[in-house]
Amino acid sequence: MNKKHFLVTDFLCGLCALCGKAFLLIFLSVASAQAHDAALADQVAQQLRALPVVRASFTQSKNIAVLKRPVVSTGRFVFSREHGIAWELLQPLRITYLLQAAGVTEIAADGRVRRQSGREAQGMYQVGKILNALWSGQTTVLDPLFNTDMQGRLEQWSLKLSPKSAPLSDFLARVSVTGAGARIERVQVTEASGDVLTIVFQASAEPVSLSLTPQELQLFATSP
């Protein structure tokens, strides 16, 4: 065996060792990042679980491909871990949606009640399911439906959700959520069509109450 052969062999051995170390470092880095993400998800969930009722106002805008300007509306909502979400649009139209496990109920300004159906209801239902899971601190219920990626720190975190398969992926491309501690600040929903819904939450100026008011209980009881 000549000297050249020894040099080539030593080079290959060294390269293999280097690749092995690099792979190990990458594996450890990925494992560390995954552990950090899991710990962060647990911390955020604990913060959110401490609030059985959440109230806030919001501004939502929807960019629709066929329109030059986004459709903007404002309103307020109340979340109850027991009853779901009452999503009340105030401007430009007054209408309320109950986003619950059983589906989506629409309450018009004149009090007419109807159960939503079709593609629009599916989108609203899935967004409601995501928000209910987040505010309940039960994000693991989303795991069968979405690939999840949580990053940041407790003081400023972000969560990215992408559907794993149809039929969810037929109308949802991805969902991005940002927040701070127990506060969800912004939700962006990108539909498969390319339309984008962005919701920005403003903290309620009302005193914090951990139970529903009689009016809120009556509103949730409207659902058929």
Image (tube, helix red, strand yellow):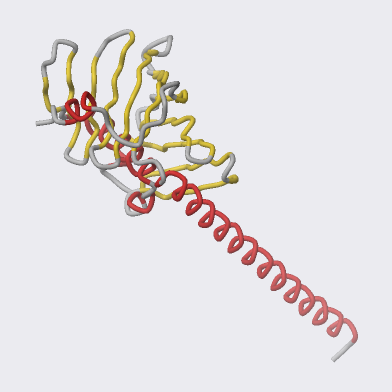
> Residue 14's quadrant in the figure?
bottom right
Q: Is residue 158 above or below residue 25?
A: above
In the image, taking residue 171 as reference, residue 22 lies left or right, namely right
Extreme residue in the right direction: 3
Tell me: residue 161, above or below residue 216: below
Q: Position of residue 97 (x, y in %)?
A: 23, 25
Count of numbered circles on the image: 0
Q: Nearer the viewer, residue 151 or 169?
A: 151
On screen, residue 13 versus residue 186, left or right, reads right
Percent of width and height locating residue 41 = 49, 51
Pick the quarter of the image with the N terminus: bottom right
- Residue sitting at 56 percent across and 61 percent down? 35
Answer with the quarter of the image where residue 162 lies: top left
Q: Where does the image place residue 175, in percent across and percent down from the top left?
A: 42, 37
Q: Nearer the viewer, residue 179 or 149?
A: 179
- Residue at 33% x, 10% y is 91
Q: Residue lying furthest bottom in this view?
A: 1
What is the quadrant of residue 3 in the picture?
Answer: bottom right
Quarter occupied by the C terminus: top left
| Residue 205 position within the rendered picture, expressed as x and y whole percent measured from the top left | 45, 21
Q: Nearer the viewer, residue 14 or 102?
A: 102
Closer to us: 42 or 46: 46
